[in-house]
Image: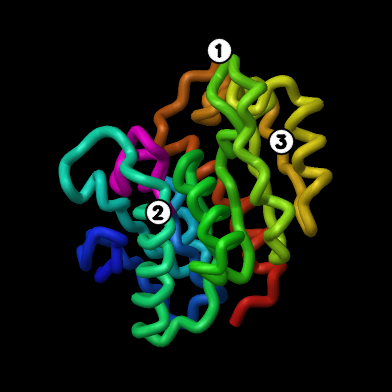
């Protein structure tokens, strides 16, 4: 997919799971430490496709280039714009942006800045701040988003502790709700319940799919 980066034109790889007669389309972004083929995303994407939702997975430019650390935020924002452009070229007029951690946060920045215009946003573990650094929240842009937002959060996620701070941030949003996963951490693993990442991802397809369909997206 072509992406117009501030440093010049580039391309990123994607995986398009088209579904004939799809009830909705999702663009699904990976987290900072894993690409689009991580088992968590594999499981989630497969379960969503099986439920009748078309899914486009993609990578950010730093992954395409073989680097481990995320590049400038502007590159991620431009990638979300490029993803929307690719979907439009494929005849998809409406989509929901879904992202694991970093991928979801970058979707929110792109939406707040007007670079992308998804019908709604789903955050799978929103990284409000680095663990142990609640003094540096990443939330100033969230009140500018006017489309519906769903925060899917583990109750034991250190990226949103203390919980009171996180709930205060959600309260500043225009249209947002939270779905809590009992006992889960940032990766949605639950202590004492060992499950493959693919199974964990698939287990979130129900709540994500229900929210997406509730947006009445053609």
Specify the segment rendered in magenta: 29-42
Q: Distance between the residues labelled 3 and 1?
A: 18 Å
* As drawn, 171 above or below 153: below
Number of numbered discs overlaid on the protein picture: 3
* Mark closer to the observer (1, 2): 2
Under circle 1, the secondary element is loop
Q: Distance between the residues labelled 2 and 3?
A: 30 Å
Q: Please tell me whether residue 149 belongs to the stretch shown in magenta.
A: no
* Mark closer to the observer (2, 3): 2
* As drawn, 130 above or below 147: above
Q: Position of residue 119 (x, y in %)?
A: 62, 71
Q: Which class describes the residues within 10 Å of circle 2: few (<14), some (14-19), or many (20+)?
A: some
The residue to which callout 3 is attached is: 180
Q: Return the disc, 2 or 3, that comes first in the chain's sequence.
A: 2
* Residue 107 appears anywhere in the view: yes
The residue to which callout 1 is attached is: 192
Q: Return the disc, 3 or 1, that comes first in the chain's sequence.
A: 3
Q: Where is residue 35 in the image (x, y as percent from the top left)?
A: 30, 43
Is residue 194 toward the left or the right of residue 10 in the image? right
Q: Could you tell me which residue is drawn at 45 percent across and 37 percent down?
A: 199
Is residue 82 toward the left or the right of residue 207 in the image? left
Q: Are marks 2 and 3 in contact (CB under 8 Å)?
A: no
The quadrant where residue 170 appears: top right
Q: Could you tell me which residue is drawn at 67 percent across and 44 percent down?
A: 140
Q: Which class describes the residues within 10 Å of circle 3: few (<14), some (14-19), or many (20+)?
A: some
Q: Position of residue 164 (x, y in %)?
A: 81, 26
């Amino acid at each position: 997919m072509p992406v117009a980066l501030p440093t010049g034109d580039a391309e990123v790889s994607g995986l398009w799971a088209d579904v004939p007669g799809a009830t909705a389309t999702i663009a699904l972004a990976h987290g900072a430490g894993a690409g689009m083929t991580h088992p968590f995303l594999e499981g989630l994407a497969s379960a969503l496709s099986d439920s009748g939702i078309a899914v486009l997975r993609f990578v950010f430019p730093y992954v395409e280039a073989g680097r481990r650390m995320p590049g400038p935020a502007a590159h991620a924002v431009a990638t979300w714009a490029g993803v929307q452009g690719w979907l439009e070229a494929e005849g998809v007029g409406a989509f929901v942006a879904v992202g694991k951690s970093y991928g979801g946060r970058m979707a929110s920045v792109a939406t707040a800045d007007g670079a992308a215009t998804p019908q709604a946003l789903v955050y799978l573990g929103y990284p409000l701040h680095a663990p142990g650094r609640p003094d540096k929240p990443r939330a100033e842009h969230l009140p500018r988003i006017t489309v519906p937002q769903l925060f899917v959060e583990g109750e034991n996620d250190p990226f949103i502790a203390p919980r009171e701070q996180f709930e205060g941030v959600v309260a500043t949003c225009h249209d947002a709700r939270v779905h809590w996963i009992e006992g889960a951490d940032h990766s949605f693993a639950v202590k004492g319940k060992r499950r493959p990442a693919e199974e964990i991802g698939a287990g979130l397809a129900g709540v994500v799919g229900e929210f997406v369909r509730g947006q009445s997206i053609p």
